[in-house]
Image (tube, rainbow, N blue to C red):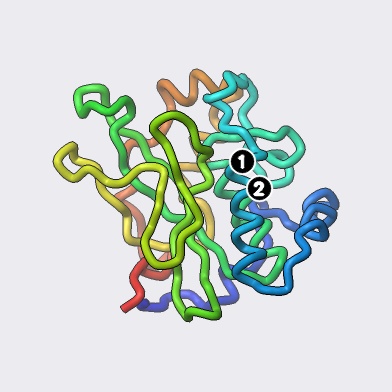
Amino acid sequence: MKQQKPMSAYLQPSPYMNFYDNKIQQLIQSFHYENEVDKIKAVYEFVRDEIKHSYDIHAMEVTRHASEVLKKGHGICYAKSHLLAALLRAINVPAGIAYQRLTLYDKPEDGYCIHALNTVYLREYNKWIRLDARGNKKGVHAEFSIEKEKLAFPIRTHLGEYDYVINFAEPHPLIIRALESYTDCCTMYNTGLPTDITEYDESENENRLLSNE
């Protein structure tokens, strides 16, 4: 993996990954696992299963910061990725965010949207993996997996979908703009999600390429 930012960048708290929050600190004490991989799996499954996807439950409120997502118990994929990264960093596990460009409703003519998932560094294996805590439902089944990815949305290149190969230490500015621009989740989900994050300044957004080469 080509490194452009130090590993410490994936361990730091930030406004949207605010793991210094008291409730987050209390929560991480409940994960009683000596093995780091087991603890990562438990944290991942908590965010995937216990924090609901806002659109699935028809929640109107937009959640953004990790502490807010935990308090409200829901968020869209962007917000859930903030919480998972925050929780993992809180237990000293390097974590970042990756993005995919997906069809919004399974057909290119319906448009595209950006989907967020997480990157996690496994010290025992000396590699990064991707985990998707979006939340499982009919047709969506993501799992913790080390060797072969089991993501919520496998890329369908024939539909124009693709992975962005950047491992972001912080949420992409366009993602934050979308979250901060709306107070109604349904409106944001249907009309305000970014459709492409290709353009960015690498000199200002020093990120690690998502590759284990």
Horizontal and vertical percent for residue 20?
Answer: 78, 58
Few, some or many residues within 10 Å of mark 1 (<14, 14–19, 20+): few
Per the model, the C-alpha gap separating discs 2 and 1 is 5 Å
For the N terminus, give its image quadrant.
bottom left
Q: Are marks 2 and 1 in contact (CB under 8 Å)?
A: yes
Which residue, given by chain and number where applicable, does mark 1 sit on? 49
Q: Is residue 207 above or below residue 53?
A: below
Mark number, residue 140: none
Horizontal and vertical percent for residue 199?
Answer: 30, 51
Secondary structure under tag 1 reads helix
Of residue 14 and residue 34, the one placed in the foreground of this image is 34
Q: Is residue 39 left or right of residue 182?
A: right
Horizontal and vertical percent for residue 32?
Answer: 78, 64
Secondary structure under tag 2 reads helix
The three-letter code of the residue at mark 2 reads Phe
The three-letter code of the residue at mark 1 reads Asp
Residue 26 lies in what quarter of the image? Answer: bottom right
Horizontal and vertical percent for residue 73?
Answer: 70, 35
Few, some or many residues within 10 Å of mark 2 (<14, 14–19, 20+): some
At a point 57% along the width and 71% down the height, the residue shown is 9
At a point 41% along the width and 78% down the height, the residue shown is 3
Residue 205 lies in what quarter of the image? Answer: bottom left
For the C terminus, give its image quadrant.
bottom left
Which residue, given by chain and number where applicable, does mark 2 sit on? 46
At a point 44% along the width and 29% down the height, the residue shown is 138
